[in-house]
Image (spheres, rainbow, N blue to C red):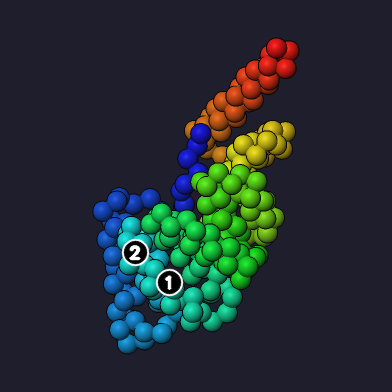
Amino acid sequence: MLDPDFRIIHHGYAQSEAVLHAKKLRNLEAAVAVLRTHPDDPFYLFHAGLSHVTLNQSREAIPYLERAVRLAQGDGEAAVALNALGQAHIELGADDQAVLALVESTRRSPRQHWGWASLGDLYLRQHRHAEAALAYEKGLGVERTTLHTEFQQPRAIVTMKLGLALLVAGHTAAAATALERSFRLGLPPEMQKAALAAMGRHVALLERAHARGGRDSRG
């Protein structure tokens, strides 16, 4: 099955790993430099934390992001810092704290689709498929904005994940509809193949279970 445990972080046009790494370091250094003289600036606290997350330094990110949440000027600003905080906890394997952060992010700003998509991804990796499907549906039901594109996932990919969550939750017909919709939205061919293979495996498992159940009831 397609691995649901991933995020799409936007860094502009395709660049080499070395160039991207250098860019992330510059972003971190710039944010930290400002914080030396303006330690309570939530914008730079958020960007310092986010830079640490993108550098796979999630433990170092958490103090910045927690402070960004506390000092945020409004729910929208708090929500995006909570989303990044949730991602940091996921990287550290602290799923309970991640759920708390991402649920609070969606509570603070329920009209931001990326909050719901992040929560759906976490539920999917925890095998909480019905809750994942609900989160993806809520995310797909809100209008997209141009804010915080670093957290945005293409609509086709979120729709595919909805289909996979519905499939494992036992809603085969709804899953097929969602997967078909993701194909129409331009899901990349390799992901289409992975999704179809996952659906085929799951349906085969259901058919074998049904056949065994029938034999047991006759015996």
Amino acid type for the residue under numbered disc 1 = Leu
Rendered image: mark on residue 65:
1
Q: Residues within 10 Å of mark 1 (few under 14, many from 20)?
A: many
- Give the secondary structure at mark 1: helix
In the picture, measured across the screen, residue 112 lies left or right of residue 42, that is right
The residue at the far bottom in this view is 37
In the picture, measured across the screen, residue 57 lies left or right of residue 78, that is left
Which residue is painted at 68% across and 59% down in the image?
142
Q: Is residue 212 above or below residue 77?
A: above
Amino acid type for the residue under numbered disc 2 = Arg
How far apart are the alpha carbons under marks 2 and 1? 11 Å
Q: Nearer the viewer, residue 196 or 217?
A: 217
Q: Residues within 10 Å of mark 2 (few under 14, many from 20)?
A: some
Q: Is residue 210 visible?
A: yes
Which residue is painted at 56% across and 33% down in the image?
195
Q: Nearer the viewer, residue 73 or 122?
A: 122
- Give the secondary structure at mark 2: helix
**Which quadrant, please, contains the C terminus?**
top right
Residue 215 location, quadrant: top right
Which residue is painted at 29% across and 51% down in the image?
17
Dot 2 corresponds to which residue?
59
Q: Nearer the viewer, residue 123 or 147?
A: 123
Give how far across and how far down residue 95 sits, in percent: 47, 56
Which residue is painted at 72% across and 17% down in the image?
217
Q: Nearer the viewer, mark 2 or mark 1?
A: 2
Give how far across and how far down residue 208 sits, in percent: 62, 19
Residue 55 location, quadrant: bottom left
Give how far across and how far down residue 133 sits, in percent: 64, 47
Residue 32 location, quadrant: bottom left
Q: Is residue 58 above or below residue 181?
A: below
Q: Is residue 71 above or below residue 165?
A: below
